[in-house]
Image (tube, grey):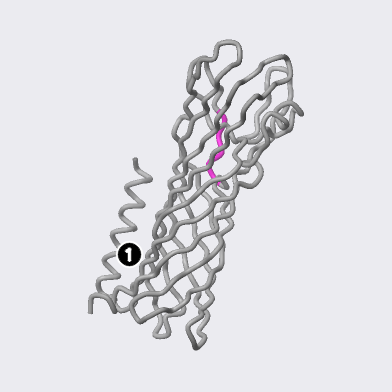
Amino acid sequence: MKKLTILLTVLFLIISLGDAHAQKVKLNIIGGYSLPLPDLKGTFPDDANSDKNPEPYFMKNGFNVGGIGKLFLDKNNSFGLTLTLLYNSFSNSVDNAVINGGVNYDNIKFKMNMFQVGIGGEYKVPVKGSVIPFFGLDLTANFLSGNTKVTPTNTKVETEYTLKSTSRFGFNIGAGTEFVASPQVSFVVGVKYQYFNLIGKDYVQDVTGTEYNLNDKEWTDALNKTHQARNMMGMQIYGGVNFNLDKMFK
């Protein structure tokens, strides 16, 4: 709760600053495809049967949707502060999976959701014309949730296991292009490399029940086997619309 309060306070300050410099404020509404990377990405049951270390989270694909507020600080609108609110969802569904030891599943579904708040900066290349490249970096707070739904072959009854909600901190780095359509509106496309859990990794032993922990920190089990830390990364590919608020509400 304390972390969320700090983020909301920063949001309020940026909005307040934007009111005083309205000619510098822009808003991107974006959406697109989210590609999981190791160790977020994994193949089930192959990675589980191979005793891969660390064991991945078995995600296959995903999507993203959100908004980016931009406040430019110089007269050329080249250097700006950014505030990003983004929702990522990753998932995977596998039929007829067989685990070493004889455990069979008619179906197993993996899902992970990440609500992301990012604060950063953007550099827009000062070129003439309607095609403008830009580069950006965000420091991010990521609030994670998810579930795993399994349907064993022997019972045919689906059971849902819920990931305990948690938070991690990381960064995004990316680039894109803005295509100017009018003084009020332009279009954007871009790509960002996302590192979701650079800071905050943890291990909490799971107990019997229908809840489990993210467990991304390195740990050693009762057989003295070390399970390596899991790094959660992804690639965000997006497109969207940019609104120049000063031109729209002038």
Coordinates of residue 52 in the picture (x, y in percent):
74, 32
Q: Count the marks: how many?
A: 1
> Is residue 194 or residue 242 the one in the foreground?
242
Q: Where is residue 78? Give x, y as percent.
A: 46, 79
Foreground pick, 249 / 225: 249
Report the amino acid beneath label 1: Ile
The quadrant holding residue 184 is: bottom left
Q: x, y percentage for residue 42?
A: 66, 38
Residue 66: x %, y % from top left: 41, 55
Q: Residue at x 33, y 72 (%)?
A: 25
Label 1, residues with CA under 10 Å away: few <14, some 14-19, many ≥20: some
What secondary structure predominates along the stretch shown in magenta?
loop
Q: Does dot 1 land on a helix, a strand or a loop? A: helix
Residue span colored magenta: 199-203
Query: Where 20 falls versus 12 (above or below)?
Result: below
The quadrant of the rendering that contains the C terminus is bottom left
Residue behind mark 1: 14
The answer to whether residue 28 is left or right of residue 127 is left
**Residue name at image x 55 percent, y 55 percent:** 236
Q: Is residue 219 above or below residue 71?
A: above
Q: Is residue 200 left or right of residue 17?
A: right
